[in-house]
């Protein structure tokens, strides 16, 4: 996503004054996919934290919200959910949800678990529980295009998470069953020939996947120790696995995210402290940051950084269902106040957006 420093240069200020107006600062948002109606909740986000919850979409997702994603420019939002059509997408603006886009002509097959847009906003992919386990579509201002052909070599079981590189030249799917992660080249034609599996596989069912902002690393959250596994990434695919973090996540890894600067990596997991964050560099994991003073309230959720890298949010299965914290090079700040209107039930996916 585009970044924003919050400070205009003198040149920008003079240009703005000369034009007779000041440029509008970007608007930030946070969305949570959750298990009960309305299945997605979205909020303005600012320096004080959560704003007043946006009105629910007029046409709700049809079941348990599992994953959520904004386009890189924040003009659309998509929710992966448990019942047909398994993915719902909406125009997005500073006013919130627009009128739901028409469902894709060929639906994903089975419960949607994860969803992602390319950074160029020209494709959307959904990880789902029934073969082919991942479905991808062209994306435009009109919504879904005709489904891309399935990859020649499918993921081996239920897809749980999906991610594109920032360059848009690769796609990865976390899934149940070995090898637990599957990756493909990606182009305007869709899936390429599957990359060779990593030499050292994740040790259990993949639950979430993320590429670093520079597309030079890939990380997988998974069910068994070490619960997160990371590799160098290049045009040739997976490199040699990075050493495990010295202090492991304490439970099943459920979600993973890099911050926009690429110098931190976060793992959401299902045992206290429910989130573990580490410095990240070309050498891999650094020494774990101290836990937040106020912990999230339960595991089994997901994690996201905002586009400016100064906030981190994690979802949880118990109220308030989402917790957010300031983030800096020193780690967690003091937890933001909970939103006035909470998500309706257990939080699964979480995403920040910006326009």
Image (cartoon, rainbow, N blue to C red):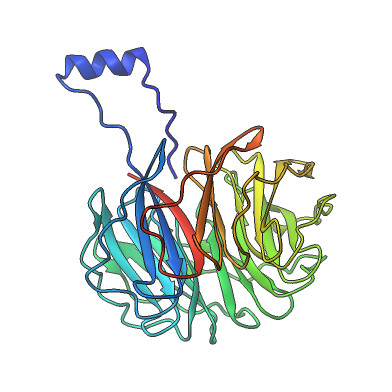
Residue 51 percent location from the top left of the image: 34, 46
Task: For the N terminus, give its image quadrant.
Answer: top left
Q: In which quarter of the image is the C terminus?
A: top left
Can residue 13 be seen here? The reply is: yes
Residue 20 position within the rendered picture, expressed as x and y whole percent measured from the top left: 14, 19
Question: Image point 67% across, 79% down: which residue?
Answer: 176
Image side of residue 119 versus residue 242, left or right: left
Name the residue nearer the viewer: 334 or 63. 334
Please provide percent x and percent y for residue 119.
44, 52
Report whether residue 119 is seen: no
**Residue situated in front as seen by the camera: 335 or 305:** 335
Residue 249 x, y percent position in the rendering: 75, 58
- 238 relative to 194, above or below: above
Q: Which residue is drawn at 50% across and 79% down?
A: 150
In the displayed structure, does residue 265 sit left or right of residue 336? right
Give the tally of numbered discs: 0
Q: Is residue 310 above or below residue 239?
A: above
Quarter location, residue 188: bottom left
Q: In which quarter of the image is residue 193?
A: bottom right
- Residue at the left extreme, as displayed: 20
Residue displayed at 79% across by 41% down: 287
Q: Residue at x 44, y 28 (%)?
A: 5
């Amino acid at each position: 996503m585009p970044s924003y420093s919050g400070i205009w240069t003198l040149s920008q200020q003079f240009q703005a004054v000369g034009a007779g107006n000041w440029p509008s600062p970007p608007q930030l948002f946070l969305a949570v996919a959750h298990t009960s109606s309305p299945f997605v909740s979205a909020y303005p986000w600012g320096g004080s934290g959560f704003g007043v919850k946006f009105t629910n979409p007029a046409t709700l997702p049809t079941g348990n919200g599992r994953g959520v994603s904004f386009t890189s420019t924040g003009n659309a939002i998509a929710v992966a959910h448990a019942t047909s059509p398994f993915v719902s997408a909406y125009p997005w603006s500073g006013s919130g949800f627009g009128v739901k886009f028409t469902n894709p002509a060929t639906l994903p097959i089975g419960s949607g678990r994860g969803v992602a847009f390319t950074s160029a906003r020209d494709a959307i992919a959904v990880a789902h529980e029934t073969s082919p386990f991942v479905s991808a579509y062209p994306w435009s201002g009109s919504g879904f295009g005709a489904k891309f052909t399935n990859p020649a070599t499918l993921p081996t079981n239920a897809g749980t998470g999906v991610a594109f590189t920032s360059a848009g030249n690769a796609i990865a799917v976390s899934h149940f069953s070995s090898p637990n992660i599957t990756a493909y080249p990606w182009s305007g034609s869709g899936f390429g020939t599957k990359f060779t599996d990593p030499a050292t596989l994740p040790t259990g069912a993949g639950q979430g996947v993320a590429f670093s902002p520079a597309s030079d690393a890939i990380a997988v959250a998974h069910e068994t120790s070490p619960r997160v596994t990371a590799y160098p990434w290049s045009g040739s695919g997976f490199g040699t696995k990075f050493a495990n973090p010295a202090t492991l996540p304490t439970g099943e890894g459920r979600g993973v995210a890099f911050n926009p600067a690429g110098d931190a990596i976060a793992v959401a997991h299902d045992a206290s402290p429910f989130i573990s964050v580490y410095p990240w560099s070309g050498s891999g994991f650094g020494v774990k940051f101290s836990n937040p003073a106020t912990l999230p309230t339960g595991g089994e959720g997901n994690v996201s950084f905002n586009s400016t890298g100064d906030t981190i949010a994690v979802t949880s299965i118990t109220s308030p269902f989402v917790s957010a914290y300031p983030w800096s090079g020193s780690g967690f700040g003091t937890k933001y106040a909970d939103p006035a209107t909470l998500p309706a039930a257990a939080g699964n996916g979480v995403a920040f957006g910006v326009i």
